[in-house]
Image (cartoon, rainbow, N blue to C red):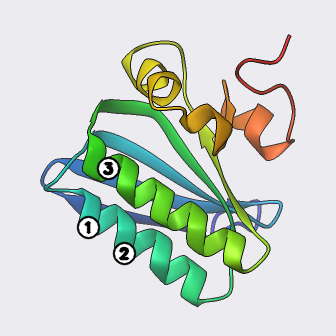
Amino acid sequence: MNVNGNSSMQQSHEDISIRVHVIDGLHIFELAGSLDIATSPTVRAALTDTSERGDHRLIVDLTKLEFLDSTGLGALIGGQRRAKEFGGEVRLVAKEGQILRLLRITGLLNVFAVYPTLDEAVGDGMRVGDI
């Protein structure tokens, strides 16, 4: 437990680091490294474990990812599908660059609520694409 009362946990795979903590009842997954065929099962398991504990309001921070492929997108989509089944959602945080371009090209900006910063995602503020 850290000083503000939010739990924090760190998981690592050779190519990805997942830091999980809670802010205002939202489970935050901060990813760093590559989300690809080798690491997507780790991310999928982390999202599923949280969902199985009854927590369906998730934020996945992609701002420290260096690479994201279709299997990584599949892990995120699976997490979103599961959360929505229970009345929840997965919000994404993505800054301008390769990852956000991929979300635009694949049409996933229409599937996920995507925010430019973690603060915006937590507060359900300005989304990417809002004017």
Residues at marks 3 and 2, CA–CA distance in whole angstroms: 12 Å
Q: Name the residue under label 3.
A: 72
> Is there any visible trace of residue 14 in the rendered image?
yes
Q: Can residue 56 be seen in this view?
A: no
Residue furthest to the bottom: 53
Q: How far apart are marks 2 and 1 (CA)?
A: 6 Å
To which quarter of the image does residue 70 belong? top left
Residue 45 — which label?
2
Numbered circles on residues, count: 3
If the image is split into quadrants, where does the C terminus sit? top right
Q: Earlier in the sequence, mark 3 or mark 2?
A: 2
In this view, the residue in front, 82 or 29, is 82
Query: How much space separates mark 1 and mark 3, taking CA atoms?
Result: 9 Å
Given residues 129 and 53, the one toward you in this image is 129
Q: Classify residue 95 as left or right of residue 38.
A: right
Check if mark 1's residue and mark 3's residue have beta carbons within 8 Å: no
